[in-house]
Image (cartoon, rainbow, N blue to C red):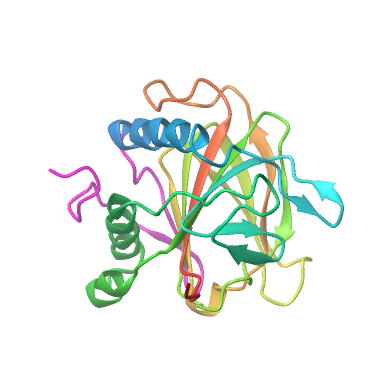
Amino acid sequence: MTLFGEEALPREPYEVAPGAVHVPGWLDDEQQRWLVDSFHGWAAGPVPPHSPVVRGHPMSVRTVCLGWHWRPYAYSRDAVDVNGERVLAVPDWMVRMGRSALLAAYGDAGAAQDYTPDTALANFYDDTARMGMHQDRDESSRAPVVSLSVGDACTFRFGNTEHRNRPWTDLRLASGDLFVFGGASRLAYHGVTRIHPGTAPDGCGLDRGRLNLTLRVTGLEG
């Protein structure tokens, strides 16, 4: 079995909202450790982990980007707000993983095969990190967003597409969980309100903290 092949441990999906699907325990221990090891490699690469600055305030997460470098509210090939270096490419195995994730969430083999993420944001949360309610709308493409969690569980708040206020749904994303949002929910506001220290399971590759890997299609060229 390839590490991120289409046969990788499918789980029963749960639709949180139209186009937004939670697949608990989608990643096995080996896959989680692979992502953690990969993150350490990216962090040692040309662009170090950094806290993006939003409206003059640094975010509490530490981010490494692949493919395209994200900064509020734009993408570039070079990390112009960090050290000016070109970010690492999105590896082929990550594209395969994204397609497998879409298949697990939606069950649509055609849509999964057409999915080609060209950027990834790897966010590390310590015990006190949060993520305010926001939309992922800096991309020209409205292809689904694939989100993977490793390490400590978090409380993930998934809202509506109109504003940051209610209605929203709070759910617990645990180590190995997959969350995909596209279609009618592609521009839904979402955020992380709490990290639950001490919940990282043995064998996931992290003793504490949460690693979140988010795959996107920018729709950009160059």
The quadrant where residue 75 appears: bottom right
Please check the rendered image and state whether residue 8 is part of the magenta-colored stretch, yes or no. Answer: yes
User: Going 22% across and 48% down the picture, which residue do you hit?
Assistant: 8
Which span of residues is magenta-colored?
1-28
Question: In this view, which residue lies farthest toward the left?
Answer: 1
Q: Please determine whether, in this image, residue 184 is positioned above or below residue 1.
A: below
Please check the rendered image and state whether residue 116 is part of the magenta-colored stretch, yes or no. Answer: no
Side of 38 where 45 appears, left or right: right
The quadrant where residue 77 appears: bottom right
User: Going 57% across and 72% down the picture, which residue do you hit?
Assistant: 139
**Residue 120 x/y as whole percent:** 48, 54
**Residue 33 x/y as whole percent:** 36, 30
Question: In this view, which residue lies farthest toward the right?
Answer: 56
Question: In this view, which residue lies farthest toward the front?
Answer: 84
Task: Pick the residue in front: 171 or 129.
Answer: 129
The quarter of the image holding the N terminus is top left
Task: Pick the residue in front: 193 or 92.
Answer: 92
Task: Pick the residue in front: 95 or 105.
Answer: 95
User: Going 49% across and 39% down the picture, which residue do you hit?
Assistant: 174
Number of labels in the image equals 0
**Residue 27 x/y as whole percent:** 34, 42
Q: Please determine whether, in this image, residue 101 is positioned above or below residue 38.
A: below
**Residue 29 x/y as whole percent:** 32, 31
Q: Please determine whether, in this image, residue 159 is positioned above or below residue 56.
A: below
User: Going 57% across and 48% down the picture, which residue do you hit?
Assistant: 85
Side of 59 where 28 appears, left or right: left
Q: Main secondary structure of the magenta part?
A: loop
The quadrant where residue 28 appears: top left
Side of 115 where 119 appears, left or right: right
